[in-house]
Amino acid sequence: EAAVRGVRQNGAVKWRGTEIYVSATLAGEPIAIEETEDGEWTMRFHTHPLGFIDEKHMKLVRRSAAPRRPLGAAATAS
């Protein structure tokens, strides 16, 4: 049960009265916006996750840019 939005020619989708930039590469394509159990809104293109909506700043935050816990030795060095 996702909300489907079409990516505009400028690479943005309309969400809650504002435009959120996704990618100019996806212009003309549909993307899905779904609420997670944590209350976050995630975006995906078919089965490919794009990131989540930062509702405070109304922008897409890519998962690769989100803070993560360090892996391996860096995680246990603290």
Image (cartoon, rainbow, N blue to C red):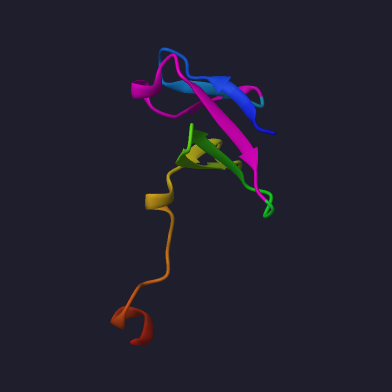
* 16 with respect to 76 (left or right): right
Q: Is residue 78 visible?
A: no
Q: Is residue 12 magenta?
A: no
Q: Is residue 26 above or below residue 2?
A: above
Q: Is residue 8 left or right of residue 18?
A: left
Report the residue at 65% width, 22% height from top.
17
Q: At which x and y percent is residue 67? A: 43, 60
Q: Is residue 74 left or right of residue 50?
A: left
Q: Position of residue 57 (x, y in %)?
A: 55, 40
Asked whether 65 or 30 is in front, the reply is: 30
Q: Measuring from the top left, give residue 14's x and y in whole percent.
A: 58, 21
- Name, please, the residue furthest toward the left: 73
Let me know if residue 31 is in the magenta part: yes
Q: Residue 11, can we see it? A: yes
Up/down of 64 relative to 33, above or below: below
**Residues drawn in magenta:** 17-36
> Residue at the spot x=53%, y=37% of the render?
43
> Where's the C terminus, which quadrant?
bottom left
Which residue occupies the extreme bottom position in the image? 77
